[in-house]
Amino acid sequence: MNEKKQGGFKLSYLIIFLVVVLLLCLLFVDFGNNGQQITTDQAIEMIENNKDPNASPDDPKASYVYIKDGVGYILVIGSKYDVNNVPTYSDYYFYIDNAGVIFDKVIESCETNGVSYNYAPAGMNFWDILIPILYIAFAIFVIWMIYRMVAGANKGAMSFGKTKVKSYSMTKVKFSDIAGMEEEKAELQEIVEFLKNPKKFTDLGARIPKGVLLVGQPGTGKTLLARAVAGESKVPFISISGSDFVEMFVGVGASRVRDLFDQAKKNKPCIVFIDEIDAVGRQRGAGLGGGNDEREQTLNQLLVEMDGFEPNEGIIVLAATNRSDVLDPALMRPGRFDRQIYVHIPDVKGREGILRIHARNKPIDESVDFGVLARITSGFTGADIENMLNESAILAARAGRPKIIMEDITEGINKVIMGPQKKSHVITEKERKLTAYHEAGHTILAKSLKHCDDVQEVSIIPRGSAGGYTMSRPETDDLMMSIGKANDTIAMSMGGRIAEEIIFKDITSGASSDIQHATKLAHAMVYEWGMSKKVGFLALSSNSQVFIGRDYQTKNDFSEKLAAIADEEIMSILNNNYKRAKQILTDKIEILHEMAKLLMERETIYKEEVDMVMAGKKTEEIVALMEKKEKAQKEKEEKIRAEKVKLDKLKAYEAKLVEGEKLVKAGVISAAELESVKKEYEAYKKSLDESLTVTKTEDTKEEKEPKVEKKTNEVKKTDKVEKETESKKDEKEEVVEIKEENKDDKKNSGKKED
């Protein structure tokens, strides 16, 4: 009944549209009757007025007559219309028969009175037939377009509940294309084996997990892992984002969930991948707008669908999120997402593997050490590493280098972390000097304190929001923060402000980010890590992100008195480290001056130069060594370019020989001509081989030469001894402080007992 009514409704509207369009077409049709209508007698009288002596001067007199299709058109003397525009424009018109007595009379009258005339033959011409056809075709086209629009709107309304899936029949990604996730790949290998050979598991009564939840930070490779599972299993991969389920219309999300699993059942065995599932899988009843909203209905339908198919039906649901803490517990229970796989940030071994995978299609120089890069890229995800190598390739291309060198990759790392350099900024000499001493303060403390990460690069060139930077990266992946490293990191972050205070007897706002970092770290020591003596083993805050609707109503579980004590402890940590850092910089004031001088001279220095300054070498000597190194690098690049040109010429000779053999067979050239080309090729190849042999010999000699001086090694040993001595002093001081506090506690307890 409803369908018939709907169809009738559509048909009636189509008829109405047709009628309206046809009426509009008729209105716009120009029949040419745009003048004043007169009778035949009046027309003849108007023609005869040219010779009628009794005619009034005001009477209109005809100057031209045109007859077409039973209609006569008249232009009068002094008309504003032109003869060529008749019959579209005329002064008067009258109806006659195109072939009759009246027609003959009009023609005779025109000839007698000397009035110009013309007439069209009886019947319709080409344009008389074409114009109505065009009008009808236009009307049909308009109706068809309106029908398409109406049908499209209805189709869109009916397809609201359809899922916006991205279906891939087969993915090319394999486990071999992924590095640094050996444990994760081993967990997912069971899924692959089940999809390939389910009988192996069912015979033993095993149940494959219905769902696997991939949890990890953004960029760790969760989506890549899901595609690799599909690629290894050779099954369809149905991908959708969690946000595609959510709509403002009630019931749409639930309908899309049903449609998604219907498609999965039609393509089984297959893998269904839901990216960013936290968009639809958040905890129910925790929203600010009430508990019965569209998102919750969508989640309920998802829970039902995951229970709605048999365990061994061949449908595996993979999902990815970086907010597993906000997911609904019903979604996480066994039978839905049975298995959770945490995709961690890659360690040093994993990063090296990722570097080698992304470097496969890039020309990397032999000097690039992937092991070193893996150590200095601590904390980088797979996406960060890919972006870093891409930026390095762009930088090498910008510099015109044939290969990517270590400096390009180092700059790529800095660009990913802090942004591009701003060399065009106009900086005064005073600001340059201040920035140089600021960064020198950070660098000296990083080299002097035992638990600080080693310095890789120091620069006074603005980058991102920073006026300069000291880049220090850890040698190993430390999963935990010790109290010693926390204190040393705080002290190191204060180095810039202290250097300004010592040298200029003034402070600037340049240390704002350093202050924030130190305060945040000290706050975590007291509130989260239990590293405060007075607060003790007590967590005062959680490091989890705020979940709207749940966490905003949470109150502190500690008193204001304890909060005041915690704040005092934070201030104590900051003040003690400030004093310690100031003492170190005061003792090494000469190194501070030399480091700042070198930075003002070169603007950017690296680990080797920093070690030289710490060893007591002068700026002039270090600059000379840096220039020598840069010159050698340029010569090496020029050699590579020259060799490339020679090899390209050799390839051109080889192609010419192949083409010459074809021409000889075709009889275009003689065999003697081809033989001369062969002799040229052989001579050029011999000379090229000799030059390449000489180049290899020179490179071998350079490799045999010692790259690191003995003094640099001695510097490292000295720094190590200094750091160990410093740490022992700190330990002794801590022991003394603890003893004094114990004494104070005993005294206070004794007073209380009295």
Image: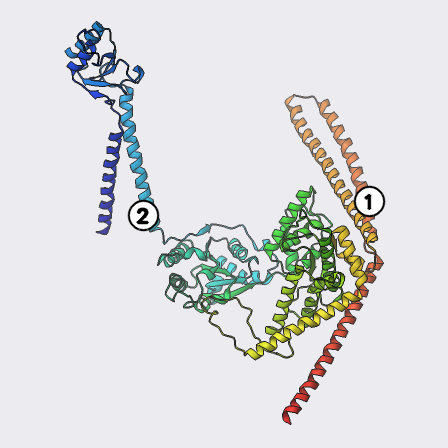
Residue at point 63% right, 59% down? 350
Q: Earlier in the sequence, mark 2 or mark 1?
A: 2
Q: Residue furthest front?
A: 57
Residue at point 74% right, 55% down? 433
Amino acid beneath label 2: Asn
- Visible residue check, residue 199: yes
Cβ–Cβ below 8 Å for labels 2 and 1? no
* Residue 227 or residue 501, whichever sits in front: 501
Q: Hey, which quadrant is residue 220 in on the image?
A: bottom right
* Quadrant where the image shows the C terminus: bottom right
Q: Hey, which quadrant is residue 655 in on the image?
A: top right
* Residue 634 or residue 465, whichever sits in front: 465
The image shows residue 145 at horizontal and vertical percentages of 32, 38
* Residue for badge 1: 698
Looking at the rendered structure, the number of numbered marks drawn on it comes to: 2
The image shows residue 386 at horizontal and vertical percentages of 61, 52
Question: SS of the residue at dot 2?
Answer: helix
Residue at point 67% right, 74% down? 572
* Residue for badge 2: 154
